[in-house]
Amino acid sequence: IATFDVTDIRKDFPILNQTIHGKPLVYFDNAATTQKPLSVIEALSQYYMEFNANIHRGIHTLAERATAEYEATRDKAKDFINAAQREEIVFTRGTTEGINLVAQTYGRQNLKAGDEVIISGMEHHSNIVPWQMICEEKGATLRVIPINEQGDLLMDEYEKLLSEKTKIVAVVYVSNSLGTINPVKEIITKAHQYGAKVLIDGAQASAHLDIDVQDLDADFYVFSSHKVYGPTGVGVLYGKRELLDAMPPYQGGGEMIREVSFGKTTYNDLPYKFEAGTPNIADTVAFKAALDYVTTIGKSVIGEYEHELLTYATESLQSIDGLQIIGQAKEKISVISYVLEGIHHQDIGIMLDNDGIAVRTGHHCTQPLMDRFCILGTSRASFAMYNTKEEIDRLVQGLHKIKKKLG
Ligand code: PMP
């Protein structure tokens, strides 16, 4: 059983050991991207130092090794989300590409005029725009599940939206702006009663929660490596095999074909049908080191520690006069969005940076959600397993300083 010692964990993340404007770095922008452990950085450099080669087509030793390592990440990713088969794991560029792939293939094939796609009021732009695009093309309608003041989805309203017209439900598992953990299993069960398929945006959930796509009965599940301590430029699209099999390819090119002639092309088996061209081999190989790192520590251990940070930060921040936390759902991961009365979030971001503290400010690619709360943006602190209570104290001190100066 892994024991969790944040001091040991921090030694694995060399980037944390630096000063910004003369102050030790406090990295609270983990919902945007996480930092990478040494094992990931080393795996990346080992790939280029020892076995860089194009995959799948080669019979020489380097190509065979590169292929084996690339495919080993697929097996690891399958286990990470408990998919039934490795063929159900498609590598993408990230969450955004995964959603676009499903909208442009499954969506284009299955939506017609009058059909409906349901999303929620707390979606990232990447789970809004691809659906708007395909709905517009097909004459389908986008419907939105509203949310309450706490930042919870109104499940009664969701049930009212569901009908025989509903073909696709696409919802975020965990909100990047509010931290809300949505009841996705219930959302999926209800959608299936109407025969609709469900895509879960797992971008923010995958580093914090144990993911079991079979238990959820998700039809599609997407996430990005870079938010799970892995490299940028890689993501996973999980899809149930019978759905992926029936879908047309996304892009045409090498690797996704079985046979090509000028008259007709037949497509490759899963998952290669959806992986046209030379993929991001290096980052995919190194992604496995990230998944290994997280699984070795264990997400329940990580989640428990992060929850401690969340509770501590929520209490500490609430003690600041004029500070309002946006998003107070009962089920949350370690994300805190807040506004300070009379002070622009951008000023907060700049002044915290002067103190060595990295937070994100703005609309967090969730403009409709900001509209819902009648704000332009927030300042957001999002915690990862390497953060500490001392760092949260630094944030609170920094905010007090800002209030004194600008408040
Ligand atoms: N969905 C959510 C909830 C996110 O937080 C993000 C990243 N901020 C995305 C989708 C898009 O992920 P990516 O930029 O890695 O494609």
Image (cartoon, grey):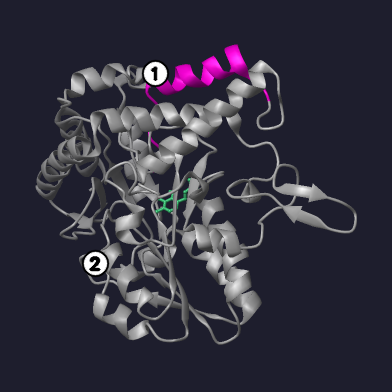
For the stretch drawn in magenta, what is the main secondary structure? Answer: helix
Q: Nearer the viewer, residue 286 or 335?
A: 286
Q: Position of residue 336 (x, y in %)?
A: 24, 49
Q: Position of residue 286 (x, y in %)?
A: 48, 27
Q: Is residue 26 above or below residue 317?
A: above
Residue at the extreme top: 49
Disc 1 residue type? Leu
Q: Nearer the viewer, residue 182 or 111?
A: 111
Query: Between tags 2 and 1, which lies in front?
Result: 1
Place of residue 220 in the rendered image (x, y in percent of width and height, measured from the top left): 45, 59
Query: Does label 2 point to a residue whose CB lies under 8 Å from ligand 1?
Result: no
Instruction: State left or right for residue 261 relative to residue 114.
Output: right
What's the residue at 65%, 75% (across, down)?
Answer: 137
Q: Which of the numbered marks, if any, corresponds to residue 38? A: 1
**Kind of element beneath mark 2:** loop
Question: Label 2: how many residues lie within 10 Å, few (<14), some (14-19) or many (20+)?
Answer: many
Residue range in magenta is 32-53
Tell me which numbered mark, 2 or 1, is placed earlier along the sequence: 1
11 falls in the magenta region: no
106 relative to 197 in the view: left or right? right
Q: Quadrant of residue 375?
A: bottom left
Residue type pointed to by label 2:
Asp
* Residue linked to disc 2: 152
- Secondary structure of the residue carrying tag 1 is helix
**Is disc 1 surrounded by few (<14), some (14 to 19) or many (20+) residues within 10 Å?**
some
Q: Is residue 39 magenta?
A: yes
Q: Can you see residue 216?
A: yes
Where does residue 373 sit, x and y in percent of width and height?
Answer: 30, 67
